[in-house]
Image (tube, rainbow, N blue to C red):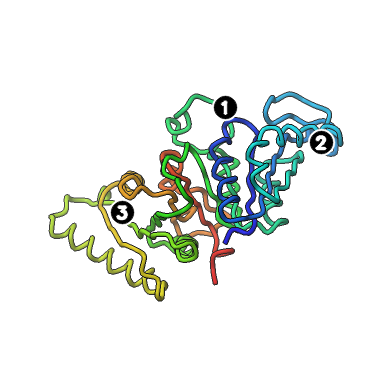
């Protein structure tokens, strides 16, 4: 399923967790790995000078400079590279998200793996600010393939992947995420957990217990009609519906099931994917989950 994986990296320790997942996925699924780094932005037009992405300093870049950056990447990931083959390393100057998307299309990648942010900062700072990196936002919005976001060390990924959680809000965008989760679980023999959290915080008046139970049953029925009906003979799944703040309940459910992958739609509202920002629920899950989160924006690469 993952014939080609694009690992987008800054070559800094902030991408170490994503690197661990990217190289391990490549090794297990015998994929071809493309390690890609955008090392800086041209200062202007066709200027031979670039603002280095890591140091912020202006450098003169030419063939020698590019080769030096490639060697730096090879040294950074030397231990992992020797265990995977083939692995291509590519670097260039440009706007990071634009070049990552360009390369994903050029190489026809089946998945992009990247970190949630690229800046060096105190642990937990991004979670405190409740915002993920702008590059990751833009890549997730524009990618035609699923984007696997790794924000923290993966504590449950003992063998990719055995417990896959699909979190849904029944939006149109969620169906593409479902197709990815279902096809992956079926192909590798993983358990698929279908999950929905009913947000009762917007209710004008507190609901009676029987009303809550009715909503839970209705949601389960909708899960059966919407998703189970598409799974044909696949029966290694379970449906659960909880009530509460969606991202909190997804994270609790993930811990309860010891999941090693959470799959969600990039956004929830019924809007053009080109205009959609990363939804608040998936953003909060990305920043707090102890396992990778796959953001799926389009039916490309997941539809039959």
Judge depth for marks 3 and 2 and give the one in front.
Answer: 2
Q: State the residue in front, 37 or 225.
A: 37
- Residue furthest to the front in view is 83
The circle on residue 120 is 1
Q: Quadrant of residue 213?
A: bottom left
Q: Provide residue 88's location: percent of width, then percent of height.
A: 73, 47
- Secondary structure of residue under mark 1: loop
Q: For this view, does 86 lie left or right of residue 145? A: right
Judge depth for marks 1 and 2 and give the one in front.
Answer: 2
The circle on residue 280 is none
Mark 1 to mark 2: distance in Å? 24 Å
Question: Tag 2: Cα neighbours inside 10 Å, few (<14), some, or many (≥20)?
Answer: some
Judge depth for marks 1 and 3 and give the one in front.
Answer: 1
Q: Provide residue 173's location: percent of width, then percent of height.
A: 47, 61
| Position above or below: 281 against 299 | above
Pointer 3 residue: 197
Q: Earlier in the sequence, mark 3 or mark 2?
A: 2
- Secondary structure of residue under mark 3: strand
Q: Provide residue 74's location: percent of width, then percent of height.
A: 72, 36
Q: Quadrant of residue 190?
A: bottom left
Q: Residue at x 29, y 51 (%)?
A: 199
Q: Residue at x 35, y 64 (%)?
A: 237
Pointer 2 residue: 67
- Secondary structure of residue under mark 2: helix
Q: For this view, does 113 lie left or right of residue 88? A: left
Q: State the residue in front, 184 or 201.
A: 184
Q: Earlier in the sequence, mark 1 or mark 3?
A: 1
User: Looking at the figure, which quarter contains the N terminus?
Assistant: bottom right
Mark 3 to mark 2: distance in Å? 49 Å
Q: Residue at x 30, y 47 (%)?
A: 256
Mark 1 to mark 3: distance in Å? 34 Å
Question: Tag 3: Cα neighbours inside 10 Å, few (<14), some, or many (≥20)?
Answer: many
């Amino acid at each position: 399923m993952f014939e080609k994986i694009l690992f987008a990296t800054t070559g800094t320790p902030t991408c170490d967790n994503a690197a661990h997942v990217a190289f391990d996925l490549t090794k297990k699924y015998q994929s071809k790995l493309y390690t890609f780094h955008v090392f800086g932005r041209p200062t202007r037009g066709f200027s031979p000078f670039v603002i280095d992405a890591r140091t912020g300093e202006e450098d003169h870049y030419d063939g020698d400079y590019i080769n030096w950056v490639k060697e730096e990447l090879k040294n950074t990931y030397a231990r992992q590279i020797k265990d995977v083959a083939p692995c291509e390393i590519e670097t260039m100057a440009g706007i990071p998200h634009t070049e990552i998307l360009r390369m994903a299309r050029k190489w026809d990648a089946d998945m992009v793996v990247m970190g949630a942010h690229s800046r060096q900062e105190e642990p937990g700072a991004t979670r405190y600010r409740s915002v993920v990196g702008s590059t990751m936002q833009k890549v997730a919005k524009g990618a035609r393939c699923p984007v696997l976001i790794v924000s923290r060390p993966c504590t449950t990924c003992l063998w990719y992947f055995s417990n896959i959680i699909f979190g849904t809000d029944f939006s149109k965008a969620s169906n593409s995420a479902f197709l990815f989760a279902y096809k992956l679980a079926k192909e590798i023999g993983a358990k698929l957990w279908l999950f929905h959290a009913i947000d009762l915080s917007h209710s004008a008046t507190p609901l009676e217990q029987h009303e809550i139970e009715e909503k839970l049953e209705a949601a389960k029925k909708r899960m059966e009609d919407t998703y189970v009906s598409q799974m044909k003979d696949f029966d290694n799944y379970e449906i659960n519906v909880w009530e509460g703040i969606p991202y909190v309940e997804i994270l609790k459910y993930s811990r309860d099931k010891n999941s090693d992958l959470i799959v969600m739609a990039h956004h929830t509202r019924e809007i053009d994917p080109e205009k959609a920002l990363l939804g608040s629920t998936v953003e909060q899950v990305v920043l707090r989950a102890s396992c990778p989160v796959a953001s799926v924006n389009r039916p490309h690469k997941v539809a039959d």
